[in-house]
Amino acid sequence: MAQPLVKKDDDRDEEADYSPFLGIEKGAVLQEARVFNDPQLDPRRCSQVITKLLYLLNQGESFTKVEATEVFFSVTKLFQSKDIGLRRMVYVMIKELSPSADEVIIVTSSLMKDMTSKTDMYRANAIRVLCRITDGTLLTQIERYLKQAIVDKNPVVASAALVSGIHLLQTNPEIVKRWSNEVQEAVQSRAALVQFHALALLHQIRQKDRLAVNKLVSSLTRGSARSPLAQCLLIRYTSQVIRESANNTQTGDRPFYDFLEGCLRHKAEMVIFEAARAITELNGVTSRELTPAITVLQLFLSSSKPVLRFAAVRTLNKVAMTHPTAVTNCNIDMESLISDQNRSIATLAITTLLKTGNESSVDRLMKQITNFMSDIADEFKIVVVEAIRSLCLKFPLKHRSLMNFLSNILREEGGFEYKKAIVDSIVILIRDIPEAKETGLLHLCEFIEDCEFTYLSTQILHFLGIEGPKTSDPSKYIRYIYNRVHLENATVRAGAVSTLAKFGAMVDGLKPRIFVLLRRCLFDTDDEVRDRATLYLNTLGGDGAVVETGADVKEFLFGSLDIPLVNLENSLKNYEASEKPFDINSVPKEVKTQPLTEKKAPGKKPTGLGAPPPGPPTTVDAYEKLLSSIPQFAKFGKLFKSSAPVELTEAETEYAVSVVKHIFDGHVVFQYNCTNTVPEQLLENVTVIVDASEAEEFAEVASKPLRSLPYDSPGQTFVAFEKPDGVPAVGKFSNMLRFIVKEVDPSTGEAEEDGVEDEYQLEDLEVVAADYILKVGVSNFRNAWESMGADFERVDEYGLGPRDSLAEAVNAVIDLLGMQPCEGTEAVPPNSRSHTCLLSGVYIGNVKVLVRLQFGLDGPKEVAMKLAVRSEDEIVSDAIHEIVASG
Amino acid sequence: MELWPLIKNILILDSEGKRIAVKYYSDDWPTNAAKEAFEKSVFTKTQKTNARTEAEITMFDDYIVVYKFVQDLHFFVTGGENENEIILAAVLQGFFDAVGLLLRGTVDKKEALENLDIILLCIDEIVDGGIILETDANVIAGKVASHSMDAGAPLSEQTITQALATAREHLTRSLLK
């Protein structure tokens, strides 16, 4: 046993924070470390000094390079001592110092000696240290010993070698893979932990080889792993195999399910839980498969161990999202967890109950939650609020008690995120449950009377302006709104003015009183508030006579902007003040596809007050500005569409080139984005030579070379083609990058005078039909479809051949057509046998197109598709069929 | 899910949240400041709970933390959000009990600091680079304790080993009740 590091001073009173390291200083300890160099080593003293050094490092102290090197060298001297305790500390110290490559050499021989020592502890630790600090070259020297160590009869040594193997596999896979045989042997080891480590390494080695993993799993699942940890690994690997083979079996029992179910009866809790969780996470799990897993998790719920309760309730909570009925059996156990000491468990229990509860239990549940809300953190409260929102949507009849609950918690203390979650929930309930509207609006009005968050106030005012005038008694909201004009900051005041104007526009009876209020706002201290008041007074005809509000005015006040805000913002930025007024119709309407991340977070519907998160900024405007600034292209007219960049080079080549296809009515412009990744080169006069022999309808008309392309600063060169007007011509183009290359002196950065002409082959580029269709969504597909009429409808059926999955087929067709999927129909539910997908877009020549795709599985993997197209022009309808037929 | 259970860190803090011994196995906290910030939030989130009889558990910032307190010492083991909670608890329990065995039942800040070398060796024997080496407290304590004796010791010393083993066993029984 180690001795106390510092003999305690008996005279001193024992302080509460007495520490043997009190007043320790790095400089002094480094001085002390000189004892490592003594010819007569005192092992105990040395151990103490190492502990002090480790203490310093542990406290976040860092050694300078020089200090670390010095310590490292003196520590290596300690290999002379035979004291085992000291040696053990030396090993830890070397790992902490993580010496550099040239320093490693100093200890290599000492460590290699220890690796072949008779003492097990030496062998095990020397392996761990050496593998931690070594690099590939040294590894080949010690490989032989490592292979021996893997099958060493001492389990500690074997484990040390195996775990080191797992780490080394990241850096030196080709070497570790040669140890397969030894690792295989270690998997059969009788030592529990050795089997665990061997299994982890063996799986990692074979990871890429699906068949081998399959074999490994099937051979091991028949026997039983010796340690619970190894059994957990096996469960993870098994579920991986199940996941990957799920596509291959259409019917019948899931392979290996019996193994997972068997693990539910294992004696170790970690194995039972691992198996239960694996079952709940199976793709398209059936309720029959779920039942045994839910049963064991239910037992865990009443365990005396918080960790078990937490693990179980967390898993059940996830199950409740997809299979609420499967979890209802646990409701009684769940309810008792609401009062759990551990608030994480309580929150998970409540949200699970909210997902699984039935209508009759809502009131009782709400009572329990009210007591609970006061003593949990905001982050938990938000989770509860979201769960209550979805519960209310599920049971609209219960809106009164749920709405009351929300308004009560809205009045209590809380941060912005929490308040926003509540307000969002109330807004959604108002929208979706008509009966809840009036009470909900009043709750919101009361909230803004005392709301410290400007963002929430303005959002609520905006919402009031839309919903308030439609209620039975709009006048009762006016007081709340006008109070804002007196009491709030300028932003909120401006919002209140707009809201007042909306009431004035919609409710004729209120008009005279609104005008009085608006006129008072003309004396506001803030110019935005005054401007808005003036604007609204004028548009509403506030100069006396009470007139019917015109349609234009209503459109102006309430009309939604059908242009993506980012596009408008970009267009406005590009607009240069001139005689010509800004034309809102010039703003592109194309929506960039929303990032899919939103779909991946179930339960987080972006339907709150704020607009849905804006998509990535489109570059369409930037392109338009760029192209119109080039004289050769200025006369091509309005840009119809720009494609996403297509890579024409492999990653990590000398020159990286991607191309953007700009489509105009009668022209196509290729924009080549070039990057020079060679620091020693400067490229000049860069052009792309395009061979359009496989694109008959295209003729090159202009090009714009890039004068110079220095290292790592991207530049563009352009080539323009003429094509028949309004015709969706397609073709294939081969590209050759041509340039003059000049050597650059890396030290001065100056280029040589003379250059050499050179060429660089790029990949081919295709203009396809999808390039002529804009992704433009419609909000209500059915309406749009009906109003388009069946005049130019074209319907046909296609066989798509064997496909990996239905989803893959759907995506392929969407990509082929380049149209905007509507109403989320691009997502195919797992395991479905048929699917309908709705697409909309605008074809070149500004022709609206709607497409209805019906997919069905025909036989095991054959996908059949029925394609119905409606458009404003029969030629276009035919063209869509043409695309599909030829794609 | 990770393909094998991964430990992100092992911490022992005192009753004010100060470091006694910590070991990080993940790059999630690249600087000392980041580590201290993590320790601070772990400490504040757990300090009011009673984790003295059974290990407790919490989840925040996509980490699962299991913890247990004794006297003025707070033990923590952290894993990723998808980790099997019970495995993490097994690591914590192994660590906690091994320290108890090695410090002969008096586990507090003073003892821990005076035997910091033992604590550090203990951590070193439990996890290597995030991979669990051993969770059995007796084995861990045995490995740490045996290091202070010469393995190639003559027969006379064997008795000491035996004596130690008996003492350990005795302690285990009293600890695990």
Image: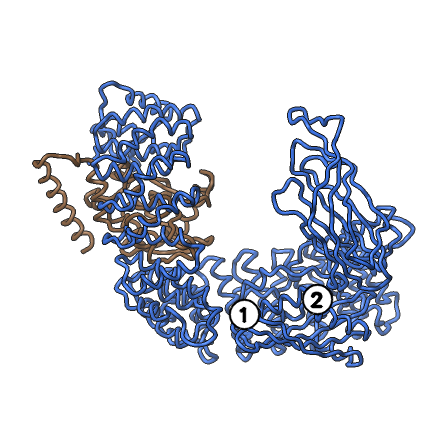
Horizontal and vertical percent for residue A78?
27, 26
- Chain of the residue under label 1: A
| Residue visible at 53% across and 78% down in the picture | A395
Residue A817 numbered tag: 2
Q: Badge 1 local density, few (<14 within 10 Å), some, or many (20+)?
A: many
Residues A477 and A238: in front is A238
| Residue visible at 33% across and 58% down in the picture | B86
Q: Quadrant of the N terminus of chain A?
A: top left
Residue A801 as seen in the image, left or right of residue B13: right
Q: Secondary structure at mark 1?
A: helix
Residue B16 as seen in the image, left or right of residue A886: left
Residue A355 seen in this snapshot: no
Q: Colour of chain B?
A: brown
Q: CA distance from mark 1 to mark 2?
A: 38 Å
| Residue visible at 78% across and 40% down in the picture | A706
- Report which residue position mark 1 lands on: A389
Horizontal and vertical percent for residue A855?
62, 75
Q: In the image as oriented, which residue stretches furthest toward the top?
A: A39
Residue A266 appears in which quarter of the rendering? Answer: bottom left
Give the chain ID for the blue colour: A
